[in-house]
Amino acid sequence: MSFRWLPALLWLSAGLLLLTALVDLSPAWREAAVAAAVGCLLLALYFVRRLYARFATLREQLAERNADIEALQLELTRQQRRRLALIDGMPIPLLICDADAMLRYANRLALEWFGFRYMTGKSLLALTFSYDLYLLMLKAARRESAVSGEITFSFPKERHTEAHIWYLGEADAHKLFAIALLDKSELLRLEQVRRDFVANVSHEFRTPLASIRSLAETIHDDPEMPHGTRQRFLNLIVQEADRLTRIADDLLTLTRAESMQPVREVFELAPVIQQAVQEMETEAQRAHVSLTAELTPDLHLLANRDQILQVALNLISNAIRYNKPQGSVTVRTYAEGHTAVLEVADTGIGIPSEALPRIFERFYRVDKTRSRADGGTGLGLAIVKHIVESHGGQVEVESEYRVGSVFRVRLPLYEEPAPSHEQAS
Ligand SMILES: Nc1ncnc2c1ncn2[C@@H]1O[C@H](COP(=O)(O)OP(=O)(O)OP(=O)(O)O)[C@@H](O)[C@H]1O
Ligand SMILES: [Mg+2]
């Protein structure tokens, strides 16, 4: 029976009760009418209970649905947050714009790039100061497809980028586009460094090769040349050939240091530096320069022994080569916290302050003629810097022009691993 009958039952029972009260019925009819009214009431009560039970079930179902909706909303919010965190943490600047080039979103790196804290609501042009990017964005909006192009930003600093723009779809009746900026400045800088390097190498090779050629031609064209002159020319040819070999050797050392992960071992620093000092003693005597060493024992490194020897040899050789007669070179090693320091100090010609930032560059020489005359290739310090940095260290220089220089190499000290628990017990 449907609930539609409920009011009818109530009305019926009320009617029956009214009938017994108002109409003078025989006792038998009255009892029958009262019984019928009570019956109707009981039936109505039964329906009310059923109705109540059904309401209770509905209420429970509603509560369950509400809980499901809340859980879904929570999950949706979490997903949105995860997506935002993903975009925000991306290592490329990312912007989201509408078709009018108004910004909707910018990730953290994009904010950093353009020096803004908040971006929403700003126009792309006002934010990036790049008309080229603005035009590229409008082009993407017109085509509703992906476009890319090279964009150079000059504010807040110069950056060469490749911008990619693609259509994301519609949201709140707005067409949205994503802009990703790939920084190519470092790539272009490296490309320039490589070009300079190749140009330098060819230049360095060309000079001795030209001398060898002209000396050989002179000897060839003059069969009557006096013996002494011929001998001098031949010596010069050998010297130039040696120079070429040295450049090739240094370039090879540098390339090896750059490309290979050298074998490392634990060794004591002092004996290696002592070996370098001994190897350079003859050169120091020839240059009338005194060479002394003050080495702290028991400093251990986890490093490539040959490369550390090379570092010491290059620094000591410079300190002798760019010294004055009766000058001195002092080589020291000591500990400073968790680092070992190798210090090579000289009382030599010093380095002018404007040249200091450049001396670690490949082929850079303060006085090209002096260095060349001494057989220098300009690669010694580049090799030092590369080896030291590949060992997690740093190299620094202090110098006073015409007074002297101090080169300091800092390398991480090897520290014995603490004994494990079982070993200790
Ligand atoms: N101790 C020093 N005192 C003064 N000038 C120095 C010193 N060490 C280096 N220089 C300057 O820095 C330049 C670069 O040094 P680097 O060792 O790289 O090359 P190089 O000595 O010319 O050649 P090589 O490759 O044979 O070492 C030198 O030409 C010199 O002008
Ligand atoms: Mg040198």
Image: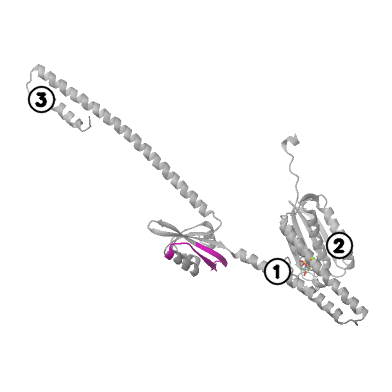
Question: In the image, residue 23 lies at what x, y percent?
Answer: 7, 23
Question: In the image, residue 414 lies at what x, y percent?
Answer: 75, 49
User: Which residue appears farthest toward the top when viewing the image?
Assistant: 28
Query: CB at mark 3 closer than 8 A to ligand 1?
Result: no
Q: Residue at x 63, y 66 (%)?
A: 189
Q: Is residue 149 magenta?
A: yes
Q: What's the CA distance linking mark 2 and mark 3? A: 135 Å
**Which residue carries the number 3 mark?**
19
Q: Where are the magenta residues, as a range?
A: 142-164
Q: How many marks?
A: 3
Q: What's the CA distance linking mark 3 and mark 1? A: 120 Å
Q: Residue at x 85, y 71 (%)?
A: 239
Task: Residue 366: tell me if it is visible.
Answer: no
Amino acid type of the residue tagged 1 in the rendering: Val
In front of the other: 131 or 358: 131
Q: Quadrant of the C terminus?
A: top right
Q: Residues within 10 Å of mark 3 (few under 14, many from 20)?
A: some
Amino acid type of the residue tagged 2 in the rendering: Met
In front of the other: 340 or 55: 55
Q: What's the CA distance linking mark 2 and mark 1? A: 31 Å
Q: Which of the two discs, 2 and 1, labels the residue nearer the N terminus?
A: 1
**Which residue carries the number 2 mark?**
280
Dot label at residue 198: 1
Amino acid type of the residue tagged 3 in the rendering: Leu
Q: Is residue 218 magenta?
A: no
Q: Quadrant of residue 380?
A: bottom right
Q: Which of the two discs, 3 and 1, labels the residue nearer the N terminus?
A: 3
Q: Quadrant of the N terminus?
A: top left
